[in-house]
Image (cartoon, rainbow, N blue to C red):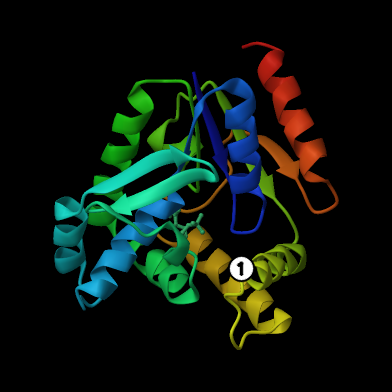
Amino acid sequence: MIIAIDGPAGSGKSTIAKIVAEKLHFRYIDTGSMYRSVAWKSLQKKVTLGDEDAVANIARETKIELVPGENGQSVFIDGENITSQLKEETISRGAAIVAAQPIIREIMTAKQRELGKQGQVVMDGRDIGTVVFPQADKKFFMDADPEERGRRRFTELKDKKQIANADLVTIIEQVKQRDQEDRNRKIAPLKQAEDAILIDTTHLSIDQVVEQIMKTINSGP
Ligand code: DC
């Protein structure tokens, strides 16, 4: 069984996907972390993010391991645990750039299909229900107002003390800009699959969203 959860940044999909996976005893896979990993390694190697061939080489040669862990998933790149670095703003920006490149998407999609082949997974991303697993058993598309998503991101950064000189207004602008990039890119843009269930999380608690998803899953095919 494959459960696809797509949606924009701050829609709550990672938090929810993690909990749903836990409840089902499924594996949780955060595909955004794969694009972030490619950006991280490219920046480490001082590769220009817009240089698709060079970034593609990085994507091919880098060993990205997603290890189920205490906080859902830990990410190891060539054996090094870099999980805590992946949410930094430079990486977020870099990930959006590399995620718009067709070759990178092809490489990542293949890896994601490989990971999903074993089944029993909850996979979150932008194109899981549309491109990676169009035949997923259950598809959800989570969304929320950009202002609310910005507030969530701001709180998350503050909690992690990663907010050196950003403010809420800036973060909301960044969220909107990332939306534009994800929704308007030519390849695998962020969009709701026709057969996905839309959940607007703006005014819902985490528990309410989880309950809604679990109900749908338990209601059978
Ligand atoms: O979910 P996230 O913020 O960690 O994703 C990081 C970037 O990768 C973001 O710009 C969207 C992109 N992404 C994508 O294009 N396709 C996916 N399946 C997952 C993420």
Q: Position of residue 110 (x, y in %)?
A: 27, 38
Residue at 31% x, 44% y is 65
In the rendered view, does 96 fall on the left or right side of 208? left
Residue drawn at x 58%, y 34% as measured from the top left: 194
Q: Is residue 159 above or below residue 217?
A: below
Q: Is residue 31 left or right of residue 174?
A: left
Q: Which residue is mark 1?
A: 160
For disc 1, the neighbor class at 10 Å (few under 14, some 14 to 19, many from 20) is few
Q: Is residue 162 above or below residue 185?
A: below
Q: Going 80% across and 54% down the picture, which residue do you hit?
A: 202
User: Does residue 195 appear anywhere in the picture?
Assistant: no
Q: Nearer the viewer, residue 176 or 71?
A: 71
Q: Between residues 159 and 184, which one lies in front from this camera angle?
A: 159
Query: Which residue of the protein is positioned furthest toward the right in this rendering?
Result: 203
Image quadrant where residue 111 sits: top left
Relative to the observer, which residue lies in front, 23 or 80? 80
Tell whether 177 sits left or right of 197.
left
